[in-house]
Image (cartoon, rainbow, N blue to C red):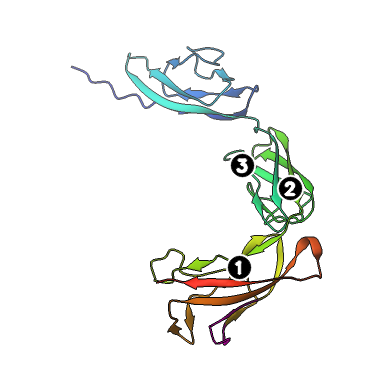
Amino acid sequence: MYIFPPVNGTATGDSICKNQSGQLSAAGGTSYTWTPATGLSCTNCPNPAANPLSTTNYSVIVTDGNGCMDTVNTSVYVQQPPNTINWDTSIVIGQTTPLPGNAGIGFTYTWTPPIDLSCSNCANPVCSSTVDITYIETISDLMGCFTGQSTFTVQILPLSSVDVPSAFTPNGDGVNDIIYVAGWGIKKLNYFRIFNRWGELIFESNDIKIGWDGTYRGVPQNTETYVYEVSVEPYIESGKSVFKKGAIKLLR
């Protein structure tokens, strides 16, 4: 009995742009059978041209002169054009909004104009414009096959308000433990002040991201009503101040 050596078939795939043609190659035998036939110029040749419309996995049976066979797998990657969109939204002045420009893996992004954006070469920049603006996103694939453009329009609503919740519960449960100045269209917090029943100032901040946690000099304050004063500068009246005064209930 004679045992023939095994077939060591090889196969090489390709990467192509959609609607273009690439090349598959196989070696190691005397005959070849490719499957599936999708997009192939021939299925019984070693090097068929390939132009599938989408990424396709291929198998080739490599057969030598002794009738011994080996099956090898490869693929043709097909770069698709980017999906482009026309998108718009409205936000209150002072707010930010992410722009949903992600077209998938394998693309680069360029935004124009590159102003009031968290980045100008990423897929999903955050817009912080305070005026109506339209952005053009240019999307290109890394293979240089396609370029597309999406349009993003952000309308800015000239609204303004200032408010402070009427109560909070600084009990350490992670819910409503800190009281903040709230509202719309606030450009700057001039001050947020809290006084106890004797008129003593027990908290003050000019950072809208900092609120009162219900303590004074590290000591938790009693359950009772406190007075607050707030002064803000709104975007729609830059240089002017809006004042508000009210009461807060501290509950535990």
**Quadrant (top left, top right, bottom left, bottom right) of the C terminus:** bottom left
Q: Which label's residue is closer to the chain start, 2 or 1?
A: 2
Instruction: Classify mark 3: helix, strand or loop.
Output: loop
Instruction: Classify mark 2: helix, strand or loop.
Output: strand
The answer to whether the residues at label 2 and label 3 have Cβ atoms under 8 Å apart is no
Q: Which one is nearer the viewer's eye here, 37 or 193?
A: 193
Q: Amino acid at mark 1?
A: Val
Where's residue 105, x and y in %?
A: 57, 40
Residue at 46 percent of width and 28 percent of height: 74
Instruction: Classify mark 1: helix, strand or loop.
Output: loop
Q: Which one is nearer the viewer's eye here, 141 or 234?
A: 234
Using the numbered discs, state the Cα–Cα distance from disc 2 to disc 3 in whole angstroms.
12 Å
Q: Which label's residue is closer to the chain start, 2 or 3?
A: 3
The answer to whether the residues at label 2 and label 1 have Cβ atoms under 8 Å apart is no
195 falls in the magenta region: yes
Q: Which residue is mark 1?
A: 181
Q: Which one is nearer the viewer's eye here, 198 or 17?
A: 198
Where's residue 117, x and y in %?
A: 71, 55
Q: Which label's residue is closer to the chain start, 3 or 1?
A: 3
Find residue 94 and report its image quarter.
Answer: bottom right
Q: Which residue is mark 2?
A: 111
The answer to whether the residues at label 3 and label 1 have Cβ atoms under 8 Å apart is no
Dot label at residue 102:
3
Badge 3: residue crowd in 10 Å (few <14, some 14–19, many ≥20): some
**From which residue to which does the magenta span run?**
192-202
